[in-house]
Amino acid sequence: MVSSINNQNDPYFIDFPGRLAQIQKAMAEENIDVYLGSRLRTLSWVTDAFCPWRSYIVIPAEGLPTAFTFVIDAARVADDSWLDEDHVLGFAPMGGQDQIDQIADFIKGLLKNGRGRIGIESGMSNYLPEGFLTHYEYEQYKAALSGAELVNAHTIIDRLALIKDEGTINRFREASRIVDVGHQAVYDAIINGGYKGMTETEIAGIAALAMRRAGSEWEWSFTGGNEIACGYRTGLAGGACTPASRKEIKAGEPLMVDIHSMFKLGLGDHSHNYLISPATDRQWWHANNFLDIVSLTLKTYKAGTSPALLAEEMMDFAEEREFADYMVPGFEHGIGMMGDEWRIGLNDGPFPYWTNPDHIYRENEVLICAMQYACPDDDIGFRYENPIVIKKDCCEELSKYPLGIEEIK
Amino acid sequence: MEGKVDYLSQEWRDEIEKRLKEEISPERMKFLTTSVTYIYKNCPDGNDRFLHFKIDDGIFSSILVDTGDPPDGEFNVTGDYEVFAKITQGIMKSQRALMGGKLKLRGNMVKALKLASLADRMNKVFAQVPANY
């Protein structure tokens, strides 16, 4: 077992039984007898284990939860989790062992006379591995648990997971330290003409090796791991997703390095940008615009502001400097333990399952300060991403890699 | 042993107990402690039957064959008499029956995987007992 549950002095300690108690209290308040979680974020937040295969967690009104995952991975999940092997079960395509039969049977054992309210996770996301219950699963569970009522209850987890505890923040801090190691490795590899002949995929690999050596578990992002772009690919309109390609790094072009690490389900996500020499005055004009708006954004984040307020202020600045046309008008995305990405806060905005622009940031929320600058006409763009912790009057930047755009000779 | 015994009879139970104790040592049973209940549906006489094993530190401490309410095992395997009979005779593989949904297993699948080879070992002993099915 590698979960940080037993040692409260461990900087990465998380009180998982405490989390469970909070969930069960919220379940009681909403008259939910059993919670059937299926989202990756819920699995991570409750089990402290990475569950890459379709998985579920059944949380009873009292007592320990039981996770269910594909049988080929159940022993490993149990080994990583604070839950023991009797509370991490495997399902398989065998009589009585498929996920519907097994979990429905298990839930029936928790309900009185097969009756009660079961909380499920239903909704939508633009994050593909979100893990909401599918229509098929819903129909199957509904039929198998015909005496029970299935109600949407994911807000219980969303609300409890919003404000991060110290152990979680420390995991993010360590993941960011690792990302900084990756950026240093990339810099060391490309300087003094080292970039010549290199491709985006090679740079992604250089960062990955350095980060793995520093303890990263994987380049967690579903956007292709480490996202590297050079030349025109940096400037694709609105292009905030650039899986590395086989494109070669060339003199006179920009280079965007957006790398990802994972440490105990805490996520590192930081982007740094370069101009490969010779850089033109026009390229430097874009670069300085970008650096100035990043700097201002980081100074503006604090408790009490909201995505809309911040965006308005930043876009006014960009307009004043005449580069608003090149800015994607968003300055953040949500983040949490593995599987919790994109939406900020709760599902309470004008567009269901998107960030509420009027969400008021509170202390110890963690988000990715993120912005994308793209000028397709000049084949140039830059990206900034850095996990930040919202503080009362400021924010803490978790990646300490110096903000800048270096011209690589 | 002379002649055949009836499958799932008390004589058959006595014979498999004798053979299991003679042929499968606690070491070969990996000093395992567990319990398994096989629930036979639709037996030829119209009843359901169960076959229950209790194993302590690799020793077969209790083997029961009976009708009525089956004791709950750590693992419970349910299926038709005909399916179990085919498995015991070596006509059908138990894994195939499980994968085809002909048998239904209740219990921790991860632990069951670890025990699959032991179940096969026991089944080979059952297959040696001349029986009327």
Image (cartoon, coloured by chain):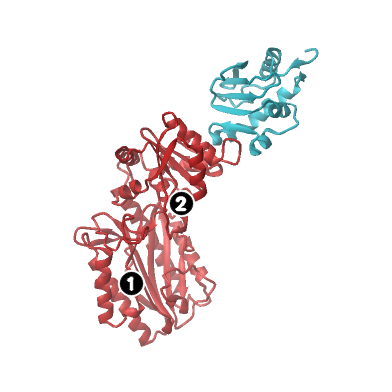
Chain colours: A red, B cyan
Q: Residues within 10 Å of mark 1 (few under 14, many from 20)?
A: some
Residue farthest toward the bottom in the current orientation of the protein: A281
Asked whether residue A75 appears in the rendered view, the answer is no
Q: Earlier in the sequence, mark 1 or mark 2?
A: 2
Residue tagged 2: A131
Q: Position of residue A354 (x, y in %)?
A: 36, 60
Mark 1 falls on what kind of element?
loop
Chain ID for label 2? A
Residue placed most toward the observer, B88 or A386: B88
Residue beneath label 1, please?
A329
Q: Quadrant of the C terminus of chain B?
A: top right
- Above or below, B42 against A350 in this view is above
Residue A279 % position (x, y): 40, 84
Cα separation, mark 1 vs mark 2, equals: 28 Å
Residue A109: give x, y in percent of width and height.
Answer: 46, 30
Image-based side of B3 in relation to A141, left or right: right
Q: Is residue A89 left or right of residue B103?
A: left
What amino acid is at disc 2? Gly
Left or right: residue B27 compared with residue A191? right
